Amino acid sequence: MICYRLHCATGHEFEGWYKDSQTFTRLQGMGLLSCPECGDTHIKQVLAAPAILKGSSHRSLSVSHADSQSSPSSTSAAVPAKTAPSKKARSAPCLPDALVGVMQRVREVIEKNCDNVGKNFAEEALRMHQGKAQKRNIYGDVSETDRELLESEGVPFQTIPWVRKADS
C-alpha cells in the first residue's frame, strides 16, 4: 500500500491509500478520484515526506451488531461484533488529523448505540450467536484466545481502531 498526500483544484488537502503508484495513476486518469470535502475530481499529488513508523502497538476495538444484514459492508462498525482495546494498547502513531476525527466520530456512534460489556464481550457475543441472549449491539474487551474462539464458532465481529475521545 502507498499513501499519497493529495489536493483538489479548490485547495483541500487529504490523503489517499492505493495498492501501488500504477493504481493511483490509473484511477486519476479515469477521473475516479474525488475530494472528500467538495467532490472535485481534479486531484493532484502534493509533495510529502515519507513516514517512518516504529514498531509500536495500537489500540483496537471490535464491534458486534445485532442485525449484520442491515449494516453497510463498507463500514467497520457495521459488523456483528465489537471489542474495546486492551489497557496495554496505545494509540496508533502518526494518524492524520482527518482520520483521527473520523475515528472519534465512529467511537461516539459506537458508545451511543452499543452496550459496553467489557471483558464479557466474547461470552456475550457467543450467547447472542447461539440464541441464548437477546441480540443487541455490543462492544468490549477481547483476548486473542477469545478472538480465536469467536472466529472458530463463526461469530461475526469486527476489530476497529479505538482512538481517544474528542475534546469537545
Image: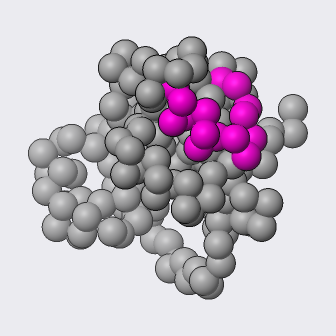
Q: Quadrant of the N terminus?
A: bottom left
Q: Position of residue 154 (x, y in %)?
A: 35, 42
In this picture, residue 159 sits left or right of residue 104: left
- Which of the colour schemes (rainbow, by chain, secondary structure, one colour) is used? one colour
User: Which residues are the magenta region?
Assistant: 114-128
Residue drawn at point x = 66 percent, y = 24 percent: 114
In the rendered image, which quarter is residue 113 located in? top right
Residue drawn at point x = 79 percent, y = 60 percent: 87
Q: Residue furthest right?
A: 168
In the rendered image, which quarter is residue 63 located in? top right
Along the viewing direction, whichever of 102 and 77 lies nearer the viewer? 77
Q: Position of residue 75 (x, y in %)?
A: 43, 34
Specify whether residue 124 is painted magenta. yes
One can see residue 91 in this view: no
Count up the numbered dots. Answer: 0
In this picture, residue 32 sits left or right of residue 64: left
Residue drawn at point x = 51 percent, y = 36 percent: 126
Along the viewing direction, whichever of 85 and 16 lies nearer the viewer? 85
For residue 92, above or below residue 72: below
Specify whether residue 146 is painted magenta. no
Q: Position of residue 117 (x, y in %)?
A: 72, 34
For residue 67, above or below residue 82: above
Q: Position of residue 62 (x, y in %)?
A: 56, 44
Along the viewing direction, whichever of 167 and 16 lies nearer the viewer? 167
Residue drawn at point x = 60 percent, y = 83 percent: 55
In this picture, residue 145 sits left or right of residue 97: left
In this picture, residue 161 sits left or right of residue 8: right
Q: Residue furthest front?
A: 132
Q: Quadrant of the C terminus?
A: top right
One can see residue 55 in this view: yes
